[in-house]
Image (cartoon, helix red, strand yellow):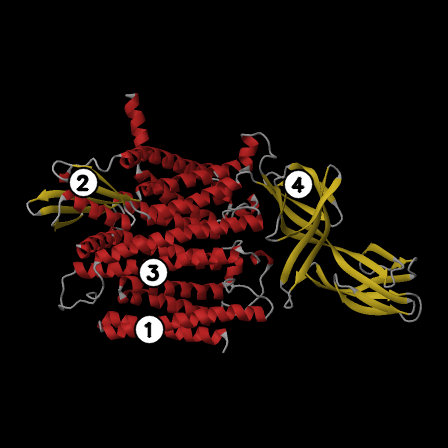
Amino acid sequence: MDSSQLFGIAMIAYLLAAAFYLGLFLFKVERIGLVGTLLALGGTCAQTAAIGLRWHESYQLGVGHAPLTNMYESLVFFAWCTSCFYLALEYRFKTRIMGAFVMPCVAMAMAYASFSDRIDSQINPLIPALQSNWLIAHVVTCFIGYAAFAVAGGLGLMYLLKQSAATRPNRSGRGMTDALPSVQVIDDLTHKTIVFGFMWLSAGIITGAVWANEAWGTYWSWDPKETWSIITWFLYALTLHARFTRGWRGRRIAWLAILGFIAVFFTYFGVNFLLSGLHSYGSA
Amino acid sequence: MTTTKKNASLGLFASVQLALFLLCLLASTSIIGTIVPQNNPAAFYVERYGAATARFFQLLDIPDMYNSWWFLGLLTLFAVNLIVCSADRIPQVIRLVRRDSLAIAPEQLEKFPLRSERHLVEDVPAAAARVTTLLRRHGWHARTAPLNPGLLCCAEKGKWSRFGVYVVHCSILVILAGALLGSSAVAHKVFRNPLFAFKGSVMLPEGERTAHIFAHKGGERLDLGFALRCDDFTIEYYGNGMPKTYRSTVTVFDGGAPVQTTDIEVNRPLTYKGVTFYQSSYQPFQEYRVALKKQDGSAATTARISAARQMDWPEGGVSYGIINRESQGEVTRRLKIWFTDNQGEPSVFWVNADQEAAIERPSGIYLLTIGQRYATGLQATKDPGVWLVYGGCLLMLVGLYIAFFLSHRRIYVYMQPDETGCHLLFAGDANKNKVGFENNFAQLINKLDSNT
């Protein structure tokens, strides 16, 4: 068995997990949710093995390096981080229903990585600029942050859904969003997730700066990727300050969590495909 | 009048609203420079956006917006806001941290978010001993003060974590200070010494030596005070043709004498006397370097030749030349060599650039290495502020950790004698992670219950 087959299995597991979590959201049958969790867990395990195997395969090809070097590998890693982060959150806070908002994102990332024409899944050797020990530190820190922000965005969406259902008069007696945690719990969780992501995003920007200084002789050159990462950082700093000092809660924070994730998405994806710059190795 | 005015402007700078507004403005204006390509010649903007828009861009420094007066102004405002905001709030925090936690009126404990009451069948000193031992066993440093009637016990953790957020603010200022110190513009205008901090580059052909570089901004010539010679530049490729390594072998000359010879690769710069050299580009020449020797070691030579030119080596008794080339852009990957020692048919063969070829001839075996001549493009940087920036970054991570993950937690136990023993009021609060603290608080009291 090679890594691409394992990635395929992980992708199918994530797609099914997303479907089951959505089933839990719609039909509120606890057993459906349990299947979703088991599938997500299985997918994550398969993907962990696949990432390890791909790493090993790169050494067999004689170009050994961590599988974190192009768009395919980073998408896969993003999916893996998000699903790990989500499962940890589910375990810690015992709220399975969040999966309906997070797992589709994970499944989409995996499916896009596997099926898009723009993405090359081959293992390629490292170009000179990427041959550095900072590679792993930089990519891992950034992607833990991205994963947290993806989850925070899902939570923001969940908050808005729950709140709009709560403010509307209840017609059928049993609302769609009854199974969701209370707005206070979602709000608190969104905040904690953003705090966690902010810490890692800061670390990601810092490791990137140190690496840039090592490779190009400048720690900050306002290249589009760098600029968008700092825009994202400003946005989350704004969110945190609005909450800590102005007492923003609920709706506003939920919208900021969603807006923040859009900025993350653009930093990660949009910059590579729409803008040009030093980070261009991420685009294929 | 003037003092109120001063207070008003100070009030503005001390406000979080301004901080939020500036963060918003910085985030949104930063987008411009990611859409409009930066630092291109003026003609580029005219061609791409039209003359009128280009003029408007020039007016607002959009082609170099991150160094424009208004963007730097925004950053300055941000820094001032950060300083005033923190200076305004730090004294309050110091007061709060310095305040004796035991100097609290027992009535105030009623207002604490977490409260629990217990009764023990023992006198106050025995209860106090029990409570303080329990607290100490769980890592709480407890102090007591007598009250009339009874005893107040207080235990605190993470008092200093209240400074975490200011550590982060301070770290941003340290980073900005480091950036200023390392800026070539500041070196020029404030220190009047362009050699204090600079970014520049030099294109150095193999075999040549230089003692100066050219600044990126303005192209000014900067004397290094020492010299650098490029001995060799090589590109290595992977099997699939992707570049694997760009390597310059350089020798540093200080005071006319060679001091060190090192390789510079991407991600492996060379630092000498505060100046760091980075492998950043290269330029191939249509000229080739030849190293030729007889295998028995009796004769050797080096030469520089062009394509389609016959070269004679009388000492070795041979003639040779390049009769064809296989190139990728300007980079020659393979060469077709014509080689004769004037005995029999000449040898004609393909050889990879920079790879040694052994040629068997009636007069003996010759070893030939032939490679393209390059100039290496080195970036040279002197940035005395970089350690300040790194220090600031480290400080930021520490500060973020303190600010987000540590909290100031307090537990009070108010013990009052009553008819049958002692009445205990537990009160607690935390400034962050209240849910986690609530659990700790409940667990502690449970421990007390199970011990009695």
Distance in Å between CA atoms under marks 1 and 3 = 19 Å
Decide if residue A116 is in sight here.
Answer: no
Amino acid beneath label 2: Leu
Badge 2 and badge 4 in a common chain: yes
User: Which residue shows up at 48% across the image and 66% down it?
Assistant: A72
Distance in Å between CA atoms under marks 3 and 4 = 49 Å
User: Which residue shows up at 39% across the image and 38% down it?
Assistant: B78
Amino acid beneath label 1: Leu
**Which residue is identified by label 2?**
B152
In the displayed structure, would residue B124 be above or below residue A2?
above
In the image, taking residue B309 as reference, residue A232 lies left or right, namely left
Observer-side mark, 2 or 4, equals: 2
What is the quadrant of residue B259 in the picture?
top right
Q: Is the residue marked by circle 2 packed among few (<14), some (14-19), or many (20+) residues within 10 Å?
A: many
Distance in Å between CA atoms under marks 1 and 2 = 51 Å
Observer-side mark, 1 or 3, equals: 1
In the displayed structure, would residue B451 be above or below residue A102?
above
Q: What element carries label 1?
A: helix
**Which residue is identified by label 4?**
B213
Badge 4 and badge 1 in a common chain: no
Amino acid beneath label 3: Val
**Which residue is identified by label 3?**
A151
Q: Nearer the viewer, residue A246 or B42?
A: A246
Q: Is the residue marked by circle 3 packed among few (<14), some (14-19), or many (20+) residues within 10 Å?
A: many
Q: Is mark 2 on a helix, strand or loop?
A: strand
The percent position of residue B118, horizontal first and vertical second, equals 13, 50
Distance in Å between CA atoms under marks 2 and 4 = 72 Å
Find out whether the residues at labels 4 and 1 contact each other: C-beta distance under 8 Å.
no
Distance in Å between CA atoms under marks 2 and 3 = 45 Å
Q: Earlier in the sequence, mark 2 or mark 4?
A: 2
Kindly identify which numbered label has been placed on residue A38.
1
